[in-house]
Image (tube, rainbow, N blue to C red):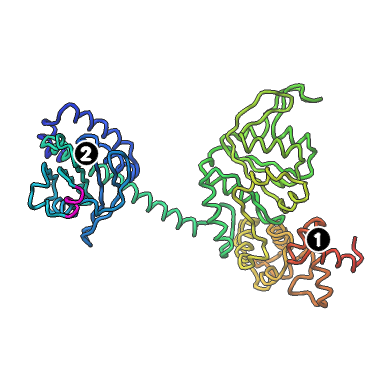
Amino acid sequence: MNNFLAENINHIKNLTKSEFESLYEFTEILNSATRQDSLIEDTIDVVIKVINAERGLFVRYFDSTDSFSIITARKISNESITDLHQFSSGILQKVIKEKKPLLYHDVMSDPNLSQFESVQIHRIKSVIGVPIIREEKVWGIIIADSQLDRREFTEENLLFLSFFSNLVSLALDRIIKLEELEKENQILINRLQSTETVPEMIGGSQTMRNLAILIHKVAQTDATVLITGESGTGKEVAAKAIHQLSKRKDKPFLAQFCGSIPDNLLESELFGYKKGAFTGANTDKQGLLEAADGGTFFLDEIADISPALQAKLLRVLENREIIRLGDVKVKKVDVRILAATNKDLQQLVKEGAFREDLFYRLNVFPIKMPPLRERREDIPILAHFFIKKLTNKALAIDSAFLKKLESFYWPGNIRQLINVIQRAIILNESDKVLTDNVTLEDERSLENFNGTLAEFEVLLLKKRLEQFNGNRTLTAKSLDVSVRWIQLKLKELGIQ
């Protein structure tokens, strides 16, 4: 910067008051500019204003191909110009060759310039060309010209534009370096997202790597997330991971299970209440949504809340407002909402059991947790992890033990796997976990089942119905059959 001042001190001394004012105005623009396009647009505005030009052009110059590309060009009326041929390529080449600002008072009378076709067609009288230097090379060129008024095309303004172009070069250099750093940072973030594990989520399968990328991406936003998946797949673990990877990680993470809870009790837990709101409300109580202000709030089994509570929750999502029970005062809350369910909310919307507007408010960014049977390659990793976590020791595992685990259907997913491993540890009497210690809820795994196809069909149907609490729609969807097929099969088997 000192070299810059030393080289331009004479220019500074010769600037007029109005030019100083223009430069001061522009330095404020330079300090606030964070993108090339905004800087260049403002640059053209200053040039046109200072020298009262009729047209302004900012081109990018590519040394390797000796070619130009318009970044911005317009008339004093703000009408855009997209055709580079409307400006003299000969004048552009002269600025490239000289690498310094050039001024032409009367282009038409200059035999070296009047020969250019664009000069003749557009009857250009005066031109100022200013190079933008970066790393000692011409990065771009500013051209301003006029067909009529030549009064501001002076040596004084040439000095001004010389100083001005150096300021632009400095600002442009800063912005380009910032943009390059941002680009490198984004590349690094994307690489991390594709390889980095999510907190508390174990697995190296492609399914889990894809899930990790989604969680990393959505964690950087404040978007509402709807996490779906079967029971035991780790929906709350995913919610905690989103919070821990977000900018809210130092603020509260609170959760509320919404299933099988009386409506009035759930409402008082979520929103709080005023003293005297109901019998037993002896003091004011802050609700969980209010307590989570600044942080993240997780609603587990969101499908189970009543229609009345759905309407109140919609208000929270739309306006970030709550009202305590028994109160009339509206409170603003800055809380990110995450929700989870093992039910098909879209089907519940069709059945009229869940508000459509609330569904779309919740389903801004859906994440589906994969069942364990869809990532069997993760089972050995999970088994080692949970054994070490439960015993504080890295016990060896019999290969037959792992094979048995991999062959099971796992209707209870991760939660069921943890239970099976814990039982195996309790029964284990050596430094190696053996297959004899595996006790599954239903020994008829995919490996051990020796019945007929019809018997297996009945077994699978019963297990799926049990898994989805008798919901025939979800059972049919998981088996990739119609609800009508389920109904007929149940009738055939005499199952109510």
- Circle 1: element type: helix
Relative to residue 148, is residue 116 depicted above or below? below
In the orientation shown, which residue stands out farthest toward the right? 494
**Residue 120 magenta-highlighted:** yes
| Disc 2 residue type (three-letter) | Ala
Q: Is residue 182 left or right of residue 361?
A: left
Q: Residue at x 70, y 35 (%)?
A: 312
Residue closest to the eye, 293 or 60:
60
**Predominant SS of the magenta segment:** helix
Q: Please determine whether, in this image, residue 319 is positioned above or below residue 419.
A: above
- Compared across the picture, whether 422 is left or right of 494 comes to left
Please state if 33 lies on the left or on the right of 403 as rendered: left
Report the amino acid beneath label 1: Leu
Query: Which residue does the numbered mark 2 point to in the structure image?
Result: 53
| Alpha carbon distance from label 1 to label 2 | 78 Å
* Disc 1 packing (10 Å; few <14; some 14–19; many ≥20): some
* Residue 183 makes an appearance in the image: yes
Residue 155 lies, in percent from the top left, at 10, 37
Magenta part of the chain: 117-122
| Of 352 and 219, the residue lying toward us | 352
Q: Residue at x 11, y 47 (%)?
A: 108
Across and down, in percent, residue 111 comes to 7, 52
Q: Quadrant of the N terminus?
A: top left
Question: Total number of numbered labels?
Answer: 2
Quarter assignment of residue 447: bottom right
Q: Is residue 195 visible?
A: no
Where does label 1 land, which residue? 465
Look at 78% across and 65% down and name the residue there: 482
Magenta stretch holds residue 19: no
Tell me which corner region of the image, top left, top right, bottom left or bottom right, holds residue 317: top right
Mark closest to the chain's N terminus, 1 or 2: 2
